[in-house]
Image (cartoon, coloured by chain):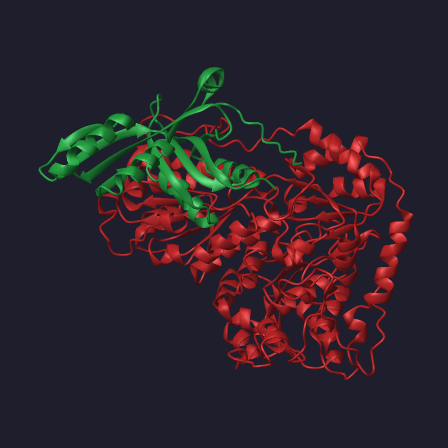
Chain colours: A red, B green
Amino acid sequence: MSPTTKMTGAQILWEALARLDVEVVFGYPGGAIMPAYDALGQARVRHVLVRHEQGAAHMADGYARTSGKVGVCISTSGPGATNLVTGIANAMMDSVPIVCITGQVASPMLGTDAFQEVDITGVTLPITKHNYLVTRADEIAATLREAFFIARSGRPGPVLVDITKDAQQAAVDFLWSDEPVRLPGYRPDYQIAPASLDRALELIAHARRPLILAGHGIVASGSGALLRDLVDRTGIPVASTLLGLGGFPATHPLSLGMMGMHGEAWVNCAIQEADLLIALGMRFDDRVTGKLSTYAVNARKIHVDIDPSEIGKLVKVDVGIVGDVAEVLSRLLPQVKFTGISRWHERISELKGDSAVRDIQTLPASGKLYAAHVMHDLYRLTGGAALVVTDVGQHQMWEAQYYRHDHPRRLITSGGLGTMGFALPAAIGARHADPDAEIWVIVGDGGFQMTAAELSTCAQEDIKLNIAIINNGYLGMVRQWQQFFYGGRYVATPLRNPDFVKLAEAHGLTGLRVTRREDLEETVKTAQVTAGTVVIDFRVEQEDSVYPMVPSGADLDDMIRRPAAPSPIVETSDSD
Amino acid sequence: MSKSIPRTFITYVEDRPGVLNRVVSLFRRRGYNIESLTVGRSAREDVSRITLVLHADEDMARRIQANLYKLVNVLYVADVTTSAAVCREMALIRVKATNGKRAEVLQLCEVFRARVVDVAPESLCLEITGTQDKIDSLVEVLRPVGILEMVRTGAVAMLRGTEADQAGATAPDRHIEHHIVAA
C-alpha cells in the first residue's frame, strides 16, 4: 500500500477484520461507534443488526462455538458496551474465543463522565482474557491482530477492544503485518513434560477401574478422533461434562453419558468407584464434583488442561499435565497399553442395570406431554444430526440427557455462567457459521423471554431456526429447587406468558403449538419443512423435575431419584 | 498439605497504564489477601518490578504464579520465599519525644540503626530500613513511648548470589517451563 493512501481508523477497523478472516459481525450502532458504521458500507465484512447488544455477544459466542473461529460483536460506548457484559462473562466462563469491539468517547473526553462514557475496560477486566483501550488510529490494526491471537490461542476467551471516536475518525497510513504476533508476556505454547507423561502412562497401565472425564477441551482442541483412538485401544469408558458432550460419540458403547448434578446415575457412581480418573480438558466444576471432600476418593487423578492455573485448583491431582489435549493425547497414544479391565466394564453394566433405568421409561403413561418426550422425539426425528442450541435450566439438562450427540460442535449451550437468554441469539450466530445445518433451539419459557427480541433479527435476516419452547409456565429449575429444598414455596417462579404462537406471527414468523404427545411428530415435521423461523410452543407437564439430582454440596453419588410412577411407559429408546 | 506462610513473589510487568490494576484485580477476584505490594521501576526501561507478599501454602503459591502468568502484561514471576534473597522494607515512624523521653528514643534508634530524619518540639521522626521482623521489633519497643504516625513501604526483594546472576541474566524474558508434577 502506498503511503499516500490514508485510511481512517474506521476503515482500518473493517480492513483489519477482513484480513483476520472475519465474515460476519453482530452489532448495534450508536454515537461513539458511528464512524465505524459509516465505513461499514464499503467493508468486506457482513453485519447482522441485533436487537440488544447482549444478543450480539451471544451471537458471536454461538458463531465461535459452531465454527471454531473467532466470533466478533460490535457496539457503541456506555450502555451499548455494558449490555455486552453478560455475553462476555459467558464466553469467559466457557473459554469461547470472541472479540468485542466497542466505541468509546473521544480521547480528550475520557475520564470526564462524558455522555455515554463508561470505563468498559475497567468493567470487563475480570471477565475478559485481555482488553485494550485504543486512542490512536495507527494502533487499531496491530491491536486487532493481537486481540484475535489472544482470543483463540492457549485457553481461548473473550478480548475486548475499546476504540475512541477520534481514533476511528483520524486518517493515517494503513500498515499491516502478516508476521506471527509476538507478545513478551504471553506464551500459550506449553512444553509438555516427558516425566509427567511417563507417570500418567504408569498410572493408566496399573489402573483396574479407570475412567476418562472428557471436557470442553476435547471439543476446543479438536481431539475427538484422538480420544476415540485412546478409548478403542484401552477400553477405558468415557464420561462427559455438559460442554464435553459430542466430543466423544454418545452412541459409542464406551460412552457413559454426562456426569455431575444432573448426570446419569451410573456415571456418578462409576466416578466414585473408579481407581483412576483421566480428566481431559475439564476443570472439576462444582456442578461436576458435588462435595469435594468425598469426590472420587478412591481414584488417582491425571489432569490434562491447557491452563496451568486449573491444575490442582479444586481437586488434588496425582499428575498434572499442562498442554493442548490434542498434543498430550498424540504423545500418549503410541505408548499406551491395553489395560484389561473387563471386570470394570461388567461393574459399570451392573451400575447401569440396577440403578439407572432412564427417567423417560418411568414417566406416567398419561398421554400428557413431558419435556423428556420432546427431547427424545427430537433426537429421533432429526436422526441425532441436528445442531442443538439450548438455554439454561431444566430443558437444558433434559436435552443433555436425551439428545445424544455423536459429533463435536453440535450442542451449543451456556455452561459455566448458566446464562438464561443465551439460546436464541447463540443460534443466530450458529446459523451464520453453518448455513445448512438443521438447527433446533431448545429453550424454556422463562429464558426465551429474556432475549425474545432477537426474533426480529431472525425475521430481518431471513434466518431459518426451529425454536422449541419447553413451556411449563414456571422458571422450572428454580421451581424444582423450591420443591426440593425450600418447602415447596413457589415464590416468583410461576410465569404468565404471552401467546408464543401469536408472538411468532407478530414477527412474521410461523408459530405452532403442541399439547399432546401424539401431535408432536407431525408438528416437528411441519417445522422442518417450513421456510423461515418456526416457534413451537410445547406445553409440557408443569411440575416435572429433572432427575437424578445431586443436591448442591452433596456427595456425587447421593442423588435424588425420580419417584416410581404407577403405570410406566415402556420406551424403545435405545433401538432407534 | 504444606503450611500457609508469608510468601514473597518478584514480578516483572510491562510498564503500561492499568497493568497494576490488572494484578491487584486478580488478587481481589481470587480472594488472595495481599500483605504488602510494592511497585516501581526496574533496571529495564518499559518494565516495572513488583514485590508481593501474601499468605499462601505451596499449592496456592503455584496457582498464584499460574494466574499471574495468565495476565498478558506479566513478563516474569518468581516465588523467592525459599530462595536466598535480600528482603528489605522501609518505615517512617513519628514518635512522641517530650524532654524526658527524647534520650530513650534516641538510644533505641542507635540500637536499631534507625535515623532521625525530622525533629519537632514534641516528637521525632525516625527512618528505618531492614527486614520486616526488625521493623516490627522497633515498632514494638516504641509503642510504649507513643507512636503518633507510621508509614511502611512493604517489602522489596532481590535474589542473592548465583541464583541472582542466573535470574538477572535472563529475566524478564526467561521462558518458564509450564509443567507441574504434583506430589
Q: x%, y% of residue A536?
A: 63, 73
Q: Is residue B94 left or right of residue A284?
A: left
Q: x%, y% of residue A256?
A: 79, 55
* Residue displayed at 52% across by 72% down: A508
Q: Is residue A236 left or right of residue A72?
A: right
Q: Is residue A13 above or below residue B80?
A: below
Quarter of the image where the N terminus of chain A is located? top left
Q: x%, y% of residue A375?
A: 71, 68
In depth, the one of A408 and A111 nearer the eye is A111
* Residue displayed at 17% across by 31% down: B103
The answer to whether one can see residue A221 in this image is: yes
* Residue displayed at 78% across by 72% down: A360
The answer to whether one can see residue A127 in this image is: no
In depth, the one of A229 and A101 nearer the eye is A229
Q: Is residue A544 left or right of residue A159?
A: right
Quarter of the image where the C terminus of chain A is located? bottom right
User: So how many labels did they put on this image?
Assistant: 0
Can you tell which quarter of the image residue A42 is in?
top left
Q: x%, y% of residue A174?
A: 37, 31
Q: Is residue A311 above or below residue A568?
A: above
* Residue displayed at 61% across by 56% down: A286
- Looking at the image, the residue that sits furthest to the front is B100
In depth, the one of A390 and B18 nearer the eye is B18
